[in-house]
Image: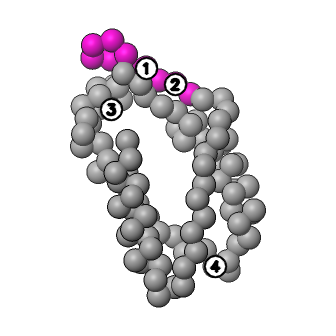
C-alpha cells in the first residue's frame, strides 16, 4: 500500500519532510551528539532505507546495512541561529 503513495509523491515529496529545530539544553558535546545520531540510525531501518526507481512504474526498497552520513557542524550565536538555520535549509532544499 505504501508503494503507491511513495511513487505518487514525485516532485512534491520534499513538502513531506518536516524541518524542526530542537534546542538542546544543556549543550551536549559534539562527540556525544554524533554518537546519538549513529545509534538512532542503527535502531530505525526507515532512516537507512532508500527507494530507487525500478521498472516503468515501480520502486525498489534498499535497506543499507552500513554506510556513512557526512555531518557538517555549524556554530552561531543564539541571535544568529535563525538566520544560519534558514541559510542551511535553503542549501539543503537545492540538493537532490
Element at badge 2?
Answer: strand
Residue with the most extreme bottom position:
79
* Inter-mark Cα distance, 1 to 3: 11 Å
> Residue at image x 47%, y 79%?
81
Question: Would you place residue 61 above or below residue 23 in this image?
Answer: above
Mark carried by residue 62: 2
Question: Would you place residue 82 above or below residue 8 in this image?
Answer: below
Residue under circle 4?
25
Q: Are marks 1 and 2 in contact (CB under 8 Å)?
A: yes
Q: Nearer the viewer, residue 49 or 86?
A: 86
Mark carried by residue 12: none
Q: Which image quarter is the N terminus in?
A: top left
Q: Left or right of 30: which side holds 10?
A: left
Q: In the rendered image, which quarter is residue 60 located in?
A: top left
Magenta segment, which residues?
54-63
* Inter-mark Cα distance, 4 to 1: 40 Å
Mark 4 surroundings: few (<14), some (14-19) or many (≥20) residues within 10 A: few
Mark carried by residue 6: 3
Amino acid at each position: 500500500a505504501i508503494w503507491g503513495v511513495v511513487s505518487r509523491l514525485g516532485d512534491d515529496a520534499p513538502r513531506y519532510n518536516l524541518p524542526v529545530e530542537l534546542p538542546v539544553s544543556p549543550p551536549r558535546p559534539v562527540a556525544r551528539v554524533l554518537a546519538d545520531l549513529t545509534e538512532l540510525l542503527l535502531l530505525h531501518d526507515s532512516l537507512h532505507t532508500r527507494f530507487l526507481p525500478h521498472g516503468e512504474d515501480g520502486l525498489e526498497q534498499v535497506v543499507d546495512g552500513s554506510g556513512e552520513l557526512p555531518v557538517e557542524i555549524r556554530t552561531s550565536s543564539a541571535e544568529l541561529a535563525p538566520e544560519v538555520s534558514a541559510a542551511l535549509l535553503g542549501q539543503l532544499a537545492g540538493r537532490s
